[in-house]
Amino acid sequence: MAHTNRPTIIRLAVYWIIAAGMTGIISGLAFATGVVEWVYEDLQRPLWLPPVMILTWFWIAKTMVMALALWVVDRFGHGWARRVSIGLLVLLYLASGGWLAGFVILRDVTFGFYAILGSWVLTALALLVIGRAQKFAAALMWPIFAWTTFMLTVSFELMRLNTSMQLVGL
């Protein structure tokens, strides 16, 4: 793609609007369906689980930074890794939908854990490929990887504390 045909700041605005809409849907569903009360009042949870508003703000920041990384790769990325990176970032957004379906709608801590595990693997892969396409976009992905790692830990603890599943060796 010629440099003159690369996405402008308008596309970044569109990416941010879509990301904001997505976070609004997830956040709205979490509060409207009572999942927040379910997690904080009904489930056994780790003592180190932050308050829901902190989790919400970090989720919003993660989604918006992913949109920025998508635009940076789309605008400044190069080579085969540019297209693959765009695809992986779109898959990461879809993985959020998987978590939404499993954890928020079905209220299944095990499904939520496996959805976050898949998202973690996908984030690690995306980080590697994005690094080949555009270094700054890869730098933007490190906090996302850290956040996903933290949420993987939270999901594992919720699953461990709230299922009768025996985890051999853990």
Image (tube, rainbow, N blue to C red):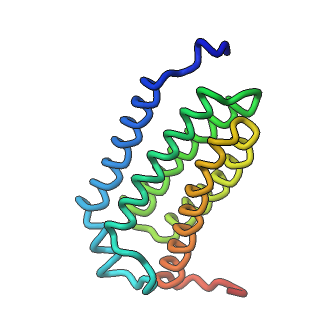
- Which residue is depicted at the point 53% across and 21% down? 7
- Which residue is depicted at the point 62% across and 59% down? 120
Relative placement, left or right, of 102 versus 105 is right
- Which residue is depicted at the point 61% across and 62% down? 117
Give the percent coordinates (x, y) of residue 62: 48, 53
Above/below status of 132 relative to 42:
above
Question: What count of labels does the image hold?
Answer: 0
Relative placement, left or right, of 58 versus 27 is right
Residue 31 sits in quarter: bottom left
Relative placement, left or right, of 74 versus 133 is left
The quadrant of the image that shows the N terminus is top right
Residue 137 sits in quarter: top right
User: Camera-side residue: 73 or 156?
Assistant: 73
User: Camera-side residue: 45 or 68?
Assistant: 68
User: Camera-side residue: 22 or 72?
Assistant: 72
Give the percent coordinates (x, y) of residue 37: 27, 73
Give the percent coordinates (x, y) of residue 10: 42, 23
- Which residue is depicted at the point 60% across and 58% down? 145
Above/below status of 113 relative to 143:
below
Above/below status of 85 relative to 167:
above
Q: Residue furthest front?
A: 136
Give the percent coordinates (x, y) of residue 74: 60, 28
The quadrant of the image that shows the C terminus is bottom right
